[in-house]
Structures are given as structure tokens and as C-alpha cells.
Amino acid sequence: MFRMAIVLIVGLLASRVTAAEMPMKIRKQIDEYFIGDWDFSMKSQDATVQGSFTASWAPGNHCVVVKQEGSGPQGKVNTTGILAWQPDTKMIVHVGFSSNGDYFRIVYDTFEANKWSGKVTGLVNGNRPDDSNANVEWSPKRFVYQDGVFKYEASRNRRAWEASLTNVVGEWKMLVDYQQGQEYDYLLRIQKAGDKLEGVVVSPRSGEHKVKSLEWDEKKNSLSLQLNRNYDGTDVELSFNAQLTEEGFSGDISIEGFGQLEDAWKAKRKDP
């Protein structure tokens, strides 16, 4: 009997913990589409507010804290917000309060792959979007929020990314282990092209190969690049993922049709 009671208590506690946790799917969307530094423009019929904000997980990762600074017809306004999962209703609630007395409360109850929908109430710039439909459409570098009164557009703040490029732009001596008993040497050239990075992998055996895509995440110190190669008439896509440390890059390779090779490549800066 005692054992059964313990089992029941543990089961109840586990169910409570599970119910209170934010679903992993939504947490991943927040990580990919919201956490970070942003520049924004908020427009209504009679006013435009522009500025920047930072969204970051609170200690314990139970909610997101949003700190925003903006300028508009009322001068400079600071806004602090909280975005959190409401377990009893299974909704996301986003509330914010501004230094000029404005406030808002958005409740999202519908979650799609790149879109959330719900309702908003509040007082912003003298407007009351009470019980108006609210929608936000996500993408990794930009999102758009819209209700019956406001349109809020945000794009990734690139200043931190730009400042970090000295860590990655340049020439790198690569060693790749395809786990066939030997390592192959290459030269990796990375350069900035507008608001993105481009790369070329130079093989002493087969010449230059332009990188299909190249992404640098300055917050995670991680590099990912995709490269298309042709081996004996067969086109193959290779994905290189690595972390940057004081020693250089090191990471894994995923080969289309063959799976992942762990700890398969590394790169150090080429001597000047």
C-alpha cells in the first residue's frame, strides 16, 4: 500500500511538472525566432516608434524578459515585458509596461510552424487595441507583428555579428578525416559579402569549390557551411558544423546519404 501511494504521488508530481513546462516545440521557436538583439519599427495610423530591444531567457529559463528602448512622438520610451507559458490554459502570454504609462497584454492560443495568433488588449500611444486579433509571423532574421491598430516589424540587430567577424573572416587551413584511414588538407577562405558570409574551399587535388551556404552564429561561436561535391559522377552535399575555440574550428561532417562523421574536421588560421 505504501509503495502504491509513493508511485501515485510521484506520478502526480511528474504530471504537474510536465504540465507546467513550456512545450519544446514552442521553446525552440522562441530560441530561433525571438531570443537576441533586434531593431524595430512600430507603426499606427498617426505615429511611428523606432528603436531596439533585447529578448533573453530569465534565470531558470521559465520566461523571456524583453527590454526595449524606442523614440517616437512622445519622446524616448522604455518598455519592459515578460513572455511566458501559461500552463493551465496552454497559452503564451506576453505583457509589457512602458515608462510613459502604456501597457499591453497579448495572449497567443494558436501556434503554427512560423505563425502565432491570439488577442491583444492595452493602451499604446493613446490607442486601445482591445480584443483585437493579434498575429506574429516568424523568420530567423525578421518577424512581423500585427493587430487591429499596430504593425510592428523587427529585424536582427547585426552590430554584434559585424563586430565578431574578425574571429572568422580570413583563410583557414583545414584537415578533414573522412574516416578512411587518412586526413585530407584544404584551404578555407571566408569573406564578408554585404550582410552575409561567403566561402571557398580549395583542394590541392581538385581546385576551388564555392561554398553553397555559410552561417556564423556569434552567440554560440558556431560555424556551419554546406558544400556540393561531385564524386565519380555522383553529386553529394556535405554539411560542416563546428565550434570556434582558442585552437580554431573543430566539429562534425554530415554527408548526404552516408550520415554523420563525428570530430571529423578542424581548422586553424593560416599563417600570415
Image (cartoon, grey):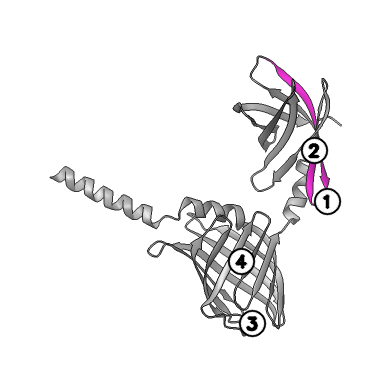
Q: Which residue is drawn at the image coordinates 75% and 23% (left, top)?
A: 233
The outermost residue toward the left is 1
The answer to whether the residue labelled 2 contacts the one labelled 4, judged by CB atoms less than 8 Å apart, is: no
Q: Is residue 67 above or below residue 48?
A: above
**Secondary structure found at label 1:** loop
> Is tag 3's residue or tag 1's residue first in the polypeptide sequence?
3
Q: Amino acid at mark 1?
A: Gly
Which residues fall within the magenta stretch? 182-198
Q: Amino acid at mark 4?
A: Lys
Quadrant of image for the N terminus: top left
Magenta segment includes 139: no
The answer to whether the residue labelled 3 contacts the one labelled 1, judged by CB atoms less than 8 Å apart, is: no
Q: Is residue 19 left or right of residue 70?
A: left
> Is tag 1's residue or tag 2's residue first in the polypeptide sequence?
1
| Residue under pointer 4 | 67
Q: Position of residue 180 (x, y in %)?
A: 65, 16
Label 1 – label 2 distance at C-alpha: 13 Å
**Secondary structure found at label 4:** strand
> Is tag 4's residue or tag 3's residue first in the polypeptide sequence?
4
Q: Which residue is drawn at the image coordinates 69% and 15% (left, top)?
A: 182
| Residue under pointer 3 | 125
Q: Is residue 243 above or below residue 44?
A: above
Label 4 – label 1 distance at C-alpha: 29 Å
| Residue under pointer 2 | 199
Q: Nearer the viewer, mark 4 or mark 1?
A: 1
Neighbor class of circle 4 (other Cα within 10 Å; few <14, some 14-19, many 20+) is some
- Residue 194: mark: 1
Q: Amino acid at mark 3?
A: Asn
The answer to whether the residue labelled 3 contacts the one labelled 2, judged by CB atoms less than 8 Å apart, is: no
Magenta segment includes 188: yes
